[in-house]
Amino acid sequence: MTLYCNGHHASVDDLAGALTNYGHFTSLQVRGGAVQGLDLHLQRLQEGTEALFGTLLDAAQVQAWMQHALHAEEMRDAALRVTVFSRAFDFRQPLRPVAVDVLVAVAPPVSMPATARRVRSVVYQRELPHLKHVGTFALFEQRRQALQDGFDDAVFVTDDGQVSEGSTWNIAFLHDEQVVWPQAPALRGTHERLLQAGFAAAQQQVRPVALAELDRFSGAIACNSAGVWPIEAIDGVAFTRSEMFCQWARGSLEAAPWQPLGVITGAG
């Protein structure tokens, strides 16, 4: 992995500013110098910057820095993580206006294998679930505990028993031929939105999904920027059509356009 800060190789001083652990990010996959849902990723970064720092983010500049990092690494296929933070942020004066910094991490491309996963439910909700902030400790610890107990991952449930999201992924269910998306507070992922667009011709519904009703569904899938994979079971409830559902989802994603990083999208 190689790190760039504001368009140049990140220095120790640059990285020291990230230790405050206040900021937000987006993760994306680049293939052939292009990204599916690039405009959605840039919109996420802009909205997070306004929410956490009260300032506007120049999406065109961020896109140019992403392209520069790929060019410098001579990579057209890669995994990028773009983090917005501020070296000037002082937690003792969090309302003081500060300029933001953009950290671009470049790594080899990642593709999630379509291996069926067994997950367990856990009552948990991220702070500010609508933001992809850098507070990821609890997410990884919930996944770690699930692995220790023989599962592949964890799916979160609200205090009143509503399914929300996975540790680092969104979830969708199949009921007959209808796609059902949980309505509980969660980070609305870029791939979730791409899939919703891809499923446009099918029946879709966004509604509360109770943990107690999971046996009504025949399939379940998980998705994030690394791809889509089938959910074999949640707790003791198995889904017999998850493999088919996953193939359908992957097929629908093929229609999503790949937006070149070298072409300014005009986000924001």
Image (cartoon, rainbow, N blue to C red):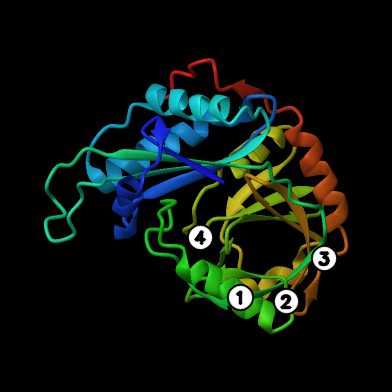
In this view, the residue farthest toward the bottom is 149
At label 4, which amino acid type do we have?
A: Ala
Residue at 33% of width from left, 58% of height from top? 19
Near-viewer residue (27 or 153): 27
Q: Is residue 84 above or below residue 19?
A: above
User: In the figure, is residue 67 to the left or right of 101?
Assistant: right
**For residue 184, which numbered disc appears in the image?**
4
**Which residue in the structure is indicated by mark 3?**
239
Image coordinates of residue 255 in percent, x first then y, are 74, 27
Closer mark to the observer between disc 1 and disc 4: 1
Using the numbered discs, state the Cα–Cα distance from disc 1 to disc 4 in whole angstroms.
23 Å
| Residues marked 1 and 4 touching at CB (< 8 Å) | no
Residue 230 visible in the current orientation: yes
**Which residue in the structure is indicated by mark 1?**
144
Residue 268 visible in the current orientation: no
Image coordinates of residue 259 in percent, x first then y, are 60, 22
Secondary structure, mark 2, is: loop
Q: Quadrant of the C terminus?
A: top left
Quarter occupied by residue 215:
bottom right
**Which residue in the structure is indicated by mark 2?**
151
Quarter occupied by residue 260:
top right
At label 3, which amino acid type do we have?
A: Phe
Closer mark to the observer between disc 3 and disc 2: 2
Mark 1 crowdedness (10 Å alpha carbons): few <14, some 14-19, many ≥20: some
Image coordinates of residue 16 in percent, x first then y, are 31, 54
